[in-house]
């Protein structure tokens, strides 16, 4: 067993990777405990940089032992110099770049780093490209703190099986899922009646739906509350992001789709809520600052002091909520349908969406076509029960080809699936 690994737990449906790992009270950290060894995947992207910010503020608590970026060599070099990271890799460096001696190159190198002995692997690679490195970390028995919902969406069943097998755990960095985790901690899962994800509504929350077909990437990238990478910001504008998060919540917390709801909450102060069978509802509240969920996951559920300023509720009032208009945001229904169909259908949803969003950002797809094409792929998806990893990868490739053809994109435009690398980092 690697030094970072936990002993394998008993297999079986009763064990849940997230809930079992977090008993009612978090044990206090021993003052002399060594720093937690962290591996950063997607180290130079939006989430990666915020993780580095958290880590830099707690140098006695964290030590970065490995880092992977997609192609940002100068960002990675800065990280090596700043934090003394010894093992680094670029997934897809520019062809004319002279990669420094000792650096790894390619997805295999990224997977090798993900499997190094560590306490937590922070997965912040955008999209399906995060799948293999995530599985490598889980197989090594390391806790995965993931910001990449696409991995659980496309391969939730496979990921959970791998985590069970090695005894590894999956902790959420996504703000809504971190909120759910915080609300669920210490509660009996049998007392939970509903998970309620909040959605900001994205850039087009109040725009006339009749004008959305002509929406430009520049308009869609203007997110009202969160500053994030381009892919997720477009997903917020369509609300596909919330659809993916419904599926992510299903796999993280073992809750059926009819009990996962979405509410629009424009100010993104209430990050999500859990409703219990006695009529109580718990909410997690905070200013929109991703460093809180990042720090909580990296520290294995322990709250570190001073990560962010507390929310000023008087200044942020009134807090408003409203239901989602399915006509304005049809993507949410498409995603829910994919989740309920199960099997490889969520993988098809995710892959079709990634291709469409990439094409939209390049001006090769209209805004309204994103949801239309993804919906058509979901309806045409084959039924596969208990899919293997190979089934998932095959479905992913099928969806990418289908959408590439539908948009008449040039050959190779769909590159960026689990075997390649899309994303900012
Ligand atoms: Mg989110």
Image: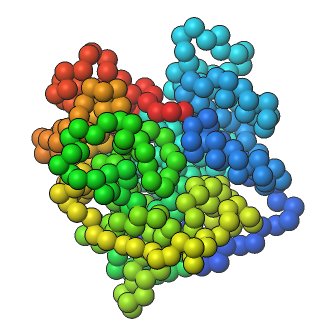
Horizontal arrangement in the rendering, residue 268 relative to residue 73 (left or right): left
Residue 300 visible in the shown view: no
Name the quarter where the C terminus is drawn.
top right
Q: Residue furthest right?
A: 32
In-front residue for pair 372/180: 372
Q: For ligand 1, which image quadrant applies?
A: bottom left
- Give left or right: position of 125 versus 250: right
| Residue situated in front as seen by the camera: 126 or 368 | 368
Q: Position of residue 24 (x, y in %)?
A: 60, 79
**Vertical relation: 145 (above or below) 44:** below
The residue under the point 57% across, 45% down is: 47
Q: Position of residue 212 (x, y in %)?
A: 23, 45
In the image, is residue 34 above or below residue 276? Answer: above
For the point 36% across and 72% down, the residue is 321
Please tell me in which quadrant of the rendered image residue 14 appears. Answer: bottom left
Residue 50, how many percent across, how many down?
64, 47
The residue shown at (44%, 69%) is 272
Residue 322 position by quadrant? bottom left
Determine the residue located farthest toward the top in the rendered image.
96
């Amino acid at each position: 067993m690697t030094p970072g690994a936990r002993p394998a737990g008993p297999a079986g449906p009763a064990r849940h990777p997230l809930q079992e790992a977090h008993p009612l009270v978090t044990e206090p950290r021993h003052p002399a405990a060594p720093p937690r060894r962290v591996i950063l995947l997607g180290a130079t992207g939006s989430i990666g940089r915020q993780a580095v910010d958290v880590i830099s503020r707690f140098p006695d608590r964290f030590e970065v032992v490995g880092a992977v970026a997609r192609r940002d060599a100068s960002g990675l070099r800065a990280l090596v110099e700043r934090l003394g990271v010894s093992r680094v890799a670029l997934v897809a460096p520019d062809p004319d770049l002279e990669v420094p001696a000792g650096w790894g190159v390619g997805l295999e190198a990224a997977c090798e780093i993900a499997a190094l002995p560590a306490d937590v692997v922070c997965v912040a690679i955008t999209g399906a490209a995060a799948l293999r490195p995530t599985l490598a970390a889980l197989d090594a028995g390391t806790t995965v703190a993931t910001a990449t919902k696409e991995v659980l969406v496309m391969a939730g069943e496979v990921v959970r099986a791998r985590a069970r097998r090695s005894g590894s755990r999956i902790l959420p960095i996504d703000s809504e899922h971190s909120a759910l985790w915080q609300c669920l901690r210490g509660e009996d899962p049998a007392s939970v009646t509903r998970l309620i994800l909040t959605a900001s509504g994205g850039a087009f929350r109040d725009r006339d739906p009749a004008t959305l077909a002509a929406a430009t990437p520049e308009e869609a990238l203007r997110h009202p509350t969160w500053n994030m990478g381009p892919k997720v910001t477009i997903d917020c504008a369509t609300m596909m992001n919330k659809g993916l998060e419904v599926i992510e919540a299903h796999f993280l917390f073992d809750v059926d789709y009819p009990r996962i709801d979405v509410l629009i909450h424009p100010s993104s102060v209430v990050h999500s809520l859990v409703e219990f069978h006695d009529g109580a509802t718990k909410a997690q509240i905070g200013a929109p600052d991703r460093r809180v969920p990042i720090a909580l996951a990296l520290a294995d559920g322990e709250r570190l002091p001073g990560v962010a300023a507390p929310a000023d509720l008087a200044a942020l009032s009134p807090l408003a909520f409203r239901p989602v208009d399915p006509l304005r945001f049809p993507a949410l229904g498409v995603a829910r349908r994919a989740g309920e169909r199960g099997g490889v259908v969520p993988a098809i949803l995710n892959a079709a969406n990634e291709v469409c969003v990439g094409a939209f950002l390049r001006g090769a797809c209209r805004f309204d076509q994103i949801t239309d094409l993804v919906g058509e792929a979901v309806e045409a998806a084959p039924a596969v029960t208990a899919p293997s990893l190979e089934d998932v990868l095959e479905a992913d490739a099928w969806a990418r080809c289908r959408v590439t053809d539908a948009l008449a994109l040039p050959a190779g435009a769909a590159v960026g699936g689990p075997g390649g690398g899309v994303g900012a980092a």
